[in-house]
Amino acid sequence: MTEPLVKPELPGGFKDYSSRQVLARQRMMRSIETVYRRFGFVPLQTSIAQRRPVLTGGKSIENRLWDMRVDKSAITTDPDLTVTARFDLTVPLARYVAANIGTIVFPFRRYEFGDVFRGETPQAGRYCEFMQFDADIVGAALGPADAEIIACMYAVMRALGIERFLIKVNDRKVLNGFAERVGFQSGSKSAAALLRVMDKADKIGLDGVLAELSAKEAPEGEEEVFSFDAAKLDMVSRFMALTEGLATNADRLSALKEYFGGEGVGAEGVAELELIAMLVTASGVPEDAWVIDAMVARGLGYYTGPVFETVLLEKPEFGSVYSGGRFDDLVARFTGESLPSVGASVGVDRLFAALESLGAVDDTEPDVDVFIITMDRSLMADYFAMAAELRAAGVSVEINMNYQDSSNRAQMGFGLSRRAPILLFYGTGDAAKGTVGVKNTATKAQESVPRSELVAKVLTVLGRSA
C-alpha cells in the first residue's frame, strides 16, 4: 500500500529562510552582537519553554500564547502545569534573574537572541514565530541606563548600515499623566486601555482614534467602553498634537513641561525625559536620529517608565523594528521586590523583511571559498587532501560530488552558482607535474601553481594572511 503524500507546507504565520537569507541574517546578527559586546553586554540563553504563569503573572495578557503539547508525566507531578512557548525574551530574563539573584552581580548587562512565539495575524515582517535580539541592563536606576540603551540602539542601526531611521522616545508616566487628566487613575486597566487605543494612531489616524473613543461599544480587542464626550475628545486631540511641528527635542520637552505644569505623574515623566535627553546628547547621538514623541506607548503592560521604538523612515509601514523600555516591576513578579531594569529588542525578522524590501540586504557572500573540480575520480584522495589542508588554514572548501554531469563545464557552472571566489583544477596531467590550476572567478585569471604552494596562493587570492 502506497503511503499518502503529505503537502510540504508550513502553517500560516511561519516562514523558512533560504541559505542565502540565513547567511545574510547571520551577518546582521554578528553586527548586532559586536555592538552589544562593545557596550559591555554578556550573553545569556533562556529556554523557549516556560511555565505559563511565568509568562502571564497569572493574568490574561494581550498576546495569544502558544501552549506546548507535552507528556507532562515525564517532567512534572503537577497536573495543572501548562508549558508555554515564550512570547518575548524579557519575561524569561526576569525569571532567570529572580532564580539566580544571589549569584548575579548588578548591574547585570545581558544580551540574548532567540525565537519567540505569538498568535500574530501574519503581515509584512510579522510572523507567529520570529527572532528577537535583546540587550538589557538589570539593576540600574533610571537615567544613565536608559540613555545607554538608546545610544546602543543608535550604534546598532548604524552598524547595520542603516542611515534613515528614527528612534522615538517617551515615558509611560507622561501618558499616565494625560490619562489622569481625562479621569482615569494612573496605571489602571482603564488608563492602559486608553493608551493602547491612542497608540493605534499610526495605523488608524487621529480620526480613527477619536472614533473608537467616542463609540458606544468597546474598541476591537478591548473591554473598556469609553464613550468620550466632545470635551474629552478635544483633550485627546490637543495632547496628540502637542509636540507636532516642534523642531527640537528641547522644544518638545518644554511643551510637555508647560502642559503638566510641574505637577503629578506626568511632570515626573517629563523630568525623566530631560535627564535622558541630556545623556543621549552627551553620547553623541545626533538630534536627527531620535525624537521625544509623546505618543509612543508600547503595547506590553510591564513597561513602567521610558519607552523606545525605532522606525525606518523609508518603510514606516513595517512599524517598529527595534523597541523596548523600562520594566522596574517585572522581577517583582517572582520576588515581591522591584528591581530597576531597562532594555531594547531588535525584531530581527521584521527588520530583515524591511531591508529586503528596500533592496538593502547584502546576499552576495560566497557559499564557499573554494570549489574543487573533480576532473578524475581516481584522484579523489588528492582532492580530499587538498581540502583538508585548506580547511586547516581557515578556508571553506567544497569538493564536487555531483556525478550526474561531471563535465568540467558543468562543474564550473555549479561552482559559480555557489559563488566560489576560487575554482581548483587538478587532473592527471597536473598530478604528474605536481601543480594545481587556481582560477580567480572575479578576474577570470587562471594560473598553475606548485602543489606545495596551494594554500599560500589561495589565501593570497582571498586577501587573507597565512
Image (cartoon, rainbow, N blue to C red):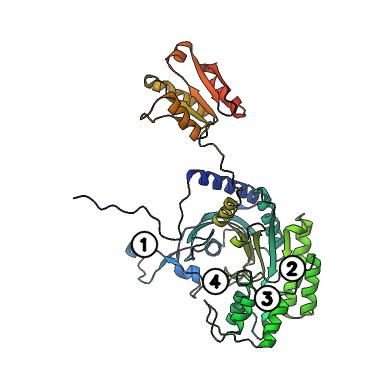
Q: Which residue is mark 1?
A: 75
Q: Please indicate, yes or no, whether residue 265 appears anywhere in the rendered image.
A: no
Query: Of the residues under marks 4 and 2, which one precedes in the sequence?
Result: 2
Question: Which callout, 3 or 1, points to the residue nearer the camera?
Answer: 3
Binning the other alpha carbons within 10 Å of mark 2 as few (below 14), some (14 to 19) or many (20 upward) gives many
Q: CA distance from mark 3 to mark 1?
A: 44 Å
Residue 234, x across and y down, in percent: 70, 83
Q: Which mark is residue 175?
A: 3
Disc 2 to disc 1: CB gap under 8 Å: no
Residue 370 at x, y percent in the picture: 51, 29
Instruction: Check whether the beta carbons of the residues at disc 3 and disc 1 lie within 8 A of each other.
Output: no
Callout 4 secondary element:
helix
Sort mark 3 into few (<14), some (14-19) or many (20+) by Cα contacts within 10 Å: many
> What amino acid is labelled 4 in the image?
Arg
Residue shown at 71% from the left, 82% from the top: 235
CA gap between label 2 and label 1 equals: 47 Å
Identify the residue position indicated by label 4 in the image.
333
Question: In the rendered view, would you say 78 is above or below 315?
Answer: below
Q: Is residue 18 above or below residue 394?
A: below
The tag earlier along the polypeptide, 3 or 4, is 3
Which of the numbered marks, if any, corresponds to residue 273? 2
Say left or right for 266 vs 98. right
Amino acid type indicated by mark 2: Leu
Earlier residue among tags 2 and 1: 1
Left or right, 144 with respect to 137, comes to right
Mark 2 to mark 3 CA distance (whole Å): 13 Å
Badge 3 amino acid: Leu
Residue situated furthest top in the rendering: 433
